[in-house]
Amino acid sequence: MTSTDPPVAGNGDADRQTGSTPRDEPGDRVGQLRGAGVSVDGRRVGRVAVGIVLVTLAVLAIVFTIVGIHTNQQDDRLHHEGVPVTFTVTGCLGLLGGSGSNAAGYSCRGTYTLDGRHYSGVQLPGDSFHRPGSTVPAIAVPGDPALVSPASIVATEHSSAGAFVLPAVLAAILLVLVALLLLLSRRSRAAGSVTAPGKR
């Protein structure tokens, strides 16, 4: 009979060299993962946040300026090119405002006829309620079916500089922030140039 000696336990060096104990490799990897660290640069985060704020203000100022120009153009066209029409209401939907529990007005749609053409599904500006089938005196611009408004609203609304108040405020805030950032950057540069000889 021949006998074989049992394998010698605890021969870690040989096992690691031959790779017979793959359980050691995950342990080493876990140790490396645990040792990994994440560093956050507060200055970069602050710069990114300030940049986002500045870009947002600039975009809002531009958008509200365009809206103001468009609104004034529509008012001018209704006053100079508009003709009286009879708007027939086909239905109104209630609008919810605030938390959604109270009514904020109504959005009504209807039809009207201008220059022999019948336009349907047109939204009527304003938030007043009108019964389906009722008629509303309105002003419409030929060639632009969507540009129609009740005569009462046209009589009270005119193009004005008030449409540019909000974009002007946003632009002023943007300019103030940019000026402050430039001032702070100049001060930091001046302080760095003063302290540099002392460090040497």
Image (cartoon, helix red, strand yellow):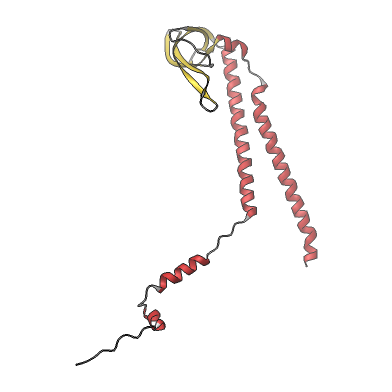
Residue 81 against residue 21 in the figure, above or below: above
Q: Residue at x 53, y 28 (%)?
A: 99
Q: How many marks?
A: 0
Residue 141 x, y percent position in the rendering: 52, 13
Query: Which residue is farthest left?
Result: 1
Q: Nearer the viewer, residue 6 or 128?
A: 6
Closer to us: 155 or 37: 37
Residue shown at the point (61%, 15%) measured from the top left: 157
Q: Quadrant of residue 122?
A: top left
Residue at 52%, 9% (x, y): give it: 138
Q: Is residue 35 above or below residue 160?
A: below
Q: Is residue 8 left or right of residue 45?
A: left
Q: Quadrant of the N terminus?
A: bottom left
Q: Quadrant of residue 56?
A: top right
Which residue is nearer to you in this view: 77 or 88?
88
Depth order, front residue of 197/73: 197
As drawn, 183 above or below 155:
below
* Image point (60%, 16%), residue name: 76
Q: Can you tell which quarter of the image residue 65 is in?
A: top right
Image location (x, y in percent) of residue 129: 50, 13
Give the percent coordinates (x, y) of residue 44.
Answer: 62, 53
Q: Quadrant of the C terminus?
A: bottom right
Q: Is residue 197 left or right of residue 41?
A: right
In-image side of 57 versus 126 (left or right): right
Residue 158 x/y as whole percent: 63, 15
